[in-house]
Amino acid sequence: MEPVIHQHAIGLIARLLRDRTGQVINEDRRWRVDRAIETVLRERGVTRSNDILTLLTQPDAAAVKQELVEALLNNETYFFRDRQVFNQLAGTVLPALCRARSESRTLRIWSAGCSTGQEPLSLAIMLIEQGLTPGNGWAVDLVATDVSHTAIEAARIGRYSRFEIQRGLGVTQMLRHFEEGPDGWQASRQVLGMVRYQVANLLDCPPPGGAFDLILCRNLLIYFDDEAKRLACAQLRQALAAHGRLLLGGGEGTLEPASGLIAAASDCALYRLGERALAA
Ligand SMILES: C[S@@+](CC[C@H](N)C(=O)[O-])C[C@H]1O[C@@H](n2cnc3c(N)ncnc32)[C@H](O)[C@@H]1O
C-alpha cells in the first residue's frame, strides 16, 4: 500500500495542475504525477518521494510548483499533424477565409496550445505555400500561445532535432524552410518571423488584437474536465470572428450545442459560431 503522505502529495499536485491549466489527471494518467515528482526530486538530488511535501512548503516552493506543472504537461506534437486536415485548411478553409477578408487582405490566426512550435510553423509554411505573404499584399497575424514556459522558450528558438524535423515534414519543405546546423535544424527567419509566441493560459482571456479568422486548439481540450472545457469554449467563442473557423483535434469528440459552436464540416473537427452566438 502507498504511504498516506505520498497520496496527499499526489492530490496536492493534481490540484495545482487543475488550478493552473484546467487539466485533470485521471487514474490512468496518474503515473505522470509519479514521474513528475521523480524528475523534480532528481534535479535537486533528493531521493525519497515523500520529500516532495517538504519541497512544496519551502521558500522556493514557487519554482518547485512551476517545475511540477511543466513536467506534467503533455507536449506531444509534430509538423503537419493530421496531414489531411492541413490539406483541407489549404484547399477549402483558407480560400473561404481569404474571400471573407478580400477587402482588408488581413488574416488573424491563433494556435492555442502550440507546444514547441511545430503546429504554428506548419501554418506559416502553409501560408507561404498559399502565397499569403506581405509580398503578395497579405498581412497575416499568426499568434501561438501555450501555458508552458519551457515549450514557448523552445518554440521561440525554432530549432529541432533530426527526429523532430522528420516527423511530418516533407523533404522539400524541410530543405526549403530549415537549415541544418551543429545543434539541429533551424527554422528560417521567414518562417519563424511569421509567428508571435506568447505564454498564455487558454482559460484566461484570448490574445488581444481583435477576432481571429482561424483558431487551432488541437489535442488539449481532451485533458480538461467539463467545467474547464466549458470555460475554454467560451474563450474560443469570444475570440472567433463571425465568419471564422475553429479546428479541434480529431480524437477530441464533438462539442455540445450548448458550447455555441456548431460543426462546419462532416469529415474533420471544424466548428463555426452557432446562430445564437452570432446574435449575442
Ligand atoms: C498535446 S500538446 C498539442 C500541441 C499541438 N496543438 C498539436 O496538436 O500538435 C498540448 C499542449 O497544450 C498545452 N496546454 C495545456 N493546457 C493549456 C492551457 N490551459 N492553456 C494553454 N496551453 C495549454 C500544453 O502545454 C501542450 O503544449
Image (cartoon, grey):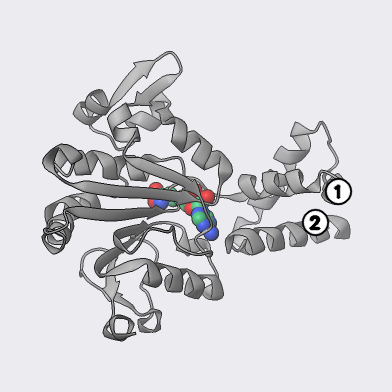
Q: Is mark 2 within 8 Å of ligand 1?
A: no
Residue carrying label 1: 50
Question: What residue appears at the point 30 percent right and 38 percent down from the top-left corner?
Answer: 168
Residue carrying label 2: 9
Vertical position of residue 155 compared to residue 221: above or below: above
User: Where's residue 190, x and y in %?
Assistant: 28, 31
How many labels sit on residues?
2
Say whether marks 2 and 1 touch (CB < 8 Å). yes
Q: CA distance from mark 2 to mark 1?
A: 8 Å
First-in-chain label (2 vs 1): 2
Q: Is residue 57 left or right of residue 83?
A: right
Q: Is residue 240 left or right of residue 146?
A: left
Question: What residue appears at the point 39 percent right and 43 percent down from the top-left corner?
Answer: 196
Q: Is residue 166 visible?
A: yes
Query: Tag 1's secondary structure?
Result: helix
Question: What residue appears at the point 43 percent right and 13 percent down from the top-left corner?
Answer: 182
Circle 1 packing at 10 Å, graded few (<14), some (14-19), many (20+), is some
Q: Nearer the viewer, residue 278 or 5?
A: 278
